[in-house]
Image (spheres, helix red, strand yellow):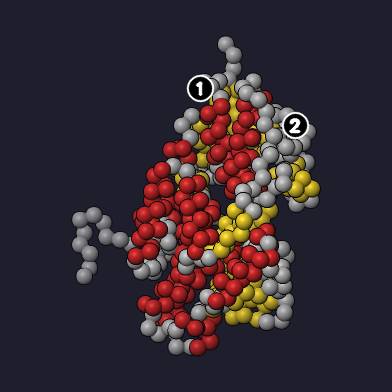
Amino acid sequence: MTKRARVVVVGGGFGGMYTARQLERRLPAGSAELILVNPENFMLYTPLLPEAASGVIEPRHVVVPLRRVLRRTRLLIGRATGFDLDRRTVTVTPPEGSPRTIEWDRLVLATGSVSRLPGIPGLAEHARGFKTLPEGIYLRNHVLRQLELADATDDPAERARRLTFVAVGAGYAGTELVAELQTLTARAIEAYPGLRPRDVRWILVDVASMIMPELGGELGRSALRILRRRGIEVRLETGVKEVGPDWVRLTDGDELPTRTFVWTAGVRPQPMVATIGLPTDQHGRLLVDRYLVAQGRDDVFALGDTVAVPDPANPSRPAPPTAQHALRQAKACAANVAASLGEGERHRFDYKGLGLLVNLGQFKGVGRVLGFPISGFLAWFVTRSYHLAAVPTWGRRFHVGVDWGIALISPSDIAELGSLGRVDPRAEDEPMSGEPRNG
């Protein structure tokens, strides 16, 4: 009998999930064992995270259950905490229980990225990130809590501190987050008679001379005008000097009193990538060729934010870390893994981006599609249409579409659910079954 090859995919984001999905299609049933290692049992559709954070979309609807999408892949919940390339093993540490060692014949690394935090005093202690679903849910609850506490205080200084929201990083994540959450507060303020719309300040800070430079100067200026017309303060060519528990000091000397400071300025590969023993570039990204094969190996593949793969549109620089590039890398990666096992032909990663789209909320957006710039309502409509088509599974598309429809005709939901799920209900002092509740 011939031993089945084992393919282990580490990471269940865009790159990892779609690689496993493509491998299921390319490898005949029973020809190989597929294993996916991921800390959660879902994939987060990150382009819709800002709308989940603002409450436009139910948070559960921006995640895709991996077990529903992957029919022939074994899912192992846990984190890859150790690699032995000589023995071809990976150590997986589950949330509960002891670590286990998994052997592999082919290894696919799609571990994604984490926020990059420079050595700014107070940044690591006081900044909030925005890369995961829990962080998005936390921000929404936190913003709503600041409105409640601002309405409850009679101290003008404390109220101003509660109603000042600062975000650093005018890339896609930071810009869309500020646009969505500012829309949330603008609509929610109607429910607080003691607060005035002009009291709420949203401030977006970036060291660059323009927001979202990937869009080009014209579209960047268009996005800037949209944000500023909405009352969002955009501070360009400005950095952060120091962060405190209720203030942030900028490089221009201005000190902003705030209880909300969000950092979205840059990402870096997962730190565990440096422990694998494979060559990396100066930014810590794994070096791979156009076939997504790790340098120095023929049995290790990598893709997504983890790698520096030459960009077909500009070979002198790596491909941008976007979802659309990760999807196309996954197709090439799966084809090459299958080819290394004797199934099909190898494929180079030759994808050139079709465009960039940014949703700025309130029926506005900017983007570039097939080289043509679009803005305003058309860009907003095209952005939503694209994401609705790109969300995996028809069930999730239906839920997202319904959420959007409800948001169009109903007031913003301002219920803060910050305490739910944080404490084991058994630990709380609740009456036992059969005992009456007071009142």
Instruction: Identify the mark nearer the N-term, 2 or 1.
Output: 1
Q: Is residue 341 above or below residue 196?
A: above
Q: CA distance from mark 2 to mark 1?
A: 27 Å
Q: Which mark is residue 150?
A: none
Of the 4 image quadrants, the one containing the N terminus is: top right
Q: Residues within 10 Å of mark 2 (few under 14, many from 20)?
A: few
The amino acid type of the residue labelled 2 equals Arg
For label 2, the residue is 297
Is there any visible trace of residue 244 in the rendered image?
no
Q: Is residue 324 above or below residue 164?
A: above
Say which of marks 2 and 1 sits in front.
1
Is there any visible trace of residue 218 in the rendered image?
yes
Q: Would residue 267 appear left or right of 390 to someone viewing this image?
A: right
Q: Residue at x 67, y 31 (%)?
A: 347
Mark 1: secondary structure = loop
Residue 293 at x, y percent in the picture: 71, 34
The amino acid type of the residue labelled 1 equals Ala
Q: Is residue 375 above or below residue 391?
A: below
Q: Residue at x 47, y 47 (%)?
A: 389
For label 1, the residue is 29
Q: Residue at x 58, y 36 (%)?
A: 19
